[in-house]
Amino acid sequence: MDLLVLNQSGAGEPRVAATPETIKRLIKEGFTPHVERGAGIGANITDDAFREAGANLIAPGSKRAEVILSVVAPSASQIQQQQTGATWIALMAPHRNTATVKLLRDQNMSAFAMELVPRISRAQNMDALSSQASIAGYRAVLLAAQQLDKYFPLLMTAAGTVQPARVVIMGAGVAGLQAIATAKRLGAVVEVSDIRPEVEEQVKSLGGRFIELPMQESGSGQGGYAKQMTPEFLAKQREIVARHVASADVVITTALVPGRPAPKLVSRDMVESMRPGAVIVDLAVEQGGNCELSKADETVIHNGVRILGEGNLPAQLPADASMLYARNLLNLLLHLYPKEKGDTELNARFARPWDLEDEIISGCLLTHGGSIRHAPTAEVINSIVRLPNEVTEPTKEQQP
């Protein structure tokens, strides 16, 4: 089976969807990998490294393949260059890329969105959202430490004691937990707010202090994600957390609800309560931001507080981000095309149809057979223009 790895460096994406390590495994599993020249340059992987691993190096846009791997959603021209019925696998961001989803559907292509891989135990090694979020949480703390006007750790010096930085982290998902661990390693005092009471133990195990909230209802959603909370609850949460934010040197926000705009957790008044020189890092900025004043890909300075709205933080560590993402893709491919007893030829695995009832496949299958299979995405697109033959009722696996 021909497999193509796209070069997306021209679109400002330094990560790449394969590495020499995964290329070798793909060849062993019966794929014929083709890599567009320069695909790995942003992650410091040379064309020679791909060639030595066994990949065929080709000019961008010159190859049609049955399976195409990329980091982010492809452009319209990249989709149109490929054959009808091809399979795309990428971080599709379907709610932001509705035109791309419709084009994939219209071209009768099958598309898998890596961020929709269900968070179940047997899919952990395919969970690209977690692998990339962990990098984002780590990087956020380093950015905050770089921009902050004081030390992170407690220091005893001849000139006196330097108090540690106080860090408030909103959201204890994968990114938040990595941020807690990194901030603690740097010596900060870390406080954490989350609407899911079950994460308190994880927060404390990493040395963080859990900010207690009035839990009349749990904020736990399906698959370990947070769910959308009522405006009344969010207002009460902001009131409690505001006292901690006012004394914080750093605030890192990571709160996201799949398929919905990021909840507003840090208001203008909360920013104005912080001291000049404090730093806010908004990891949810690409979905509207958790901070009222943050702007995508900009640093906003308000009353002396620096609000960092850098998007795509995993791309700032492209080598490790590519390594982990490429492994996620490899594991999904092996799940889509499993070897079975009785296979006498390598291509037997590629001839079998996918098991569309499988929880992993159905969970991340975005388009297939000329329709949009992921119900929440279909609903978003249908709200723009009514489309025929769309799934309108989400299955249990496809609930956001």
Image (cartoon, rainbow, N blue to C red):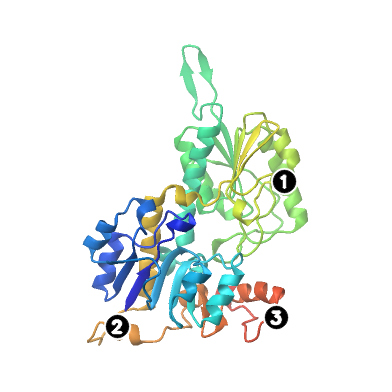
Along the line of sight, the residue nearer the viewer: 141 or 192:
141
Q: Secondary structure at mark 1?
A: helix
Cβ–Cβ below 8 Å for labels 2 and 1? no
Image coordinates for residue 132, horizontal then vertical, percent: 46, 55
Residue at the top extreme, as displayed: 158
Q: Amino acid at mark 2?
A: Glu
Res 150 quadrant in image = top right
Q: Do the residues bearing badges 3 and 1 touch, measured as CB atoms within 8 Å?
A: no
Q: Residue furthest right?
A: 232
Q: Which residue is mark 2?
A: 340
Q: Residue at x 48, y 83 (%)?
A: 357
Is residue 192 positioned above or below 70 on the image?
above
Q: Could you say where residue 305 lies in the image, as x and y percent from the top left?
A: 65, 34
Which residue is identified by label 3? 386
Please rate how many residues cluster around mark 1, counting C-alpha atoms within 10 Å: few if below 14, some from 14 to 19, many from 20: some
Alpha carbon distance from label 3 to label 1: 38 Å
**Residue appearing at x 29%, y 86% in the figure:** 348
Quadrant in the picture for the C terminus: bottom right
Report the residue at 48% width, 38% height from top. Answer: 142
Say if 330 sits above or below 272 in the image.
below
N-term-proximal mark, 3 vs 1: 1
Residue at 74% x, 43% y: name it. 239
Asked if residue 167 can be seen in this view, the reply is yes
Q: Earlier in the sequence, mark 2 or mark 1?
A: 1
Apparent side of residue 270 relative to residue 362 in the rendered image (left or right): right
User: Gap between marks 2 and 1, in whole Å?
Assistant: 53 Å
Q: Which mark identifies residue 238?
A: 1
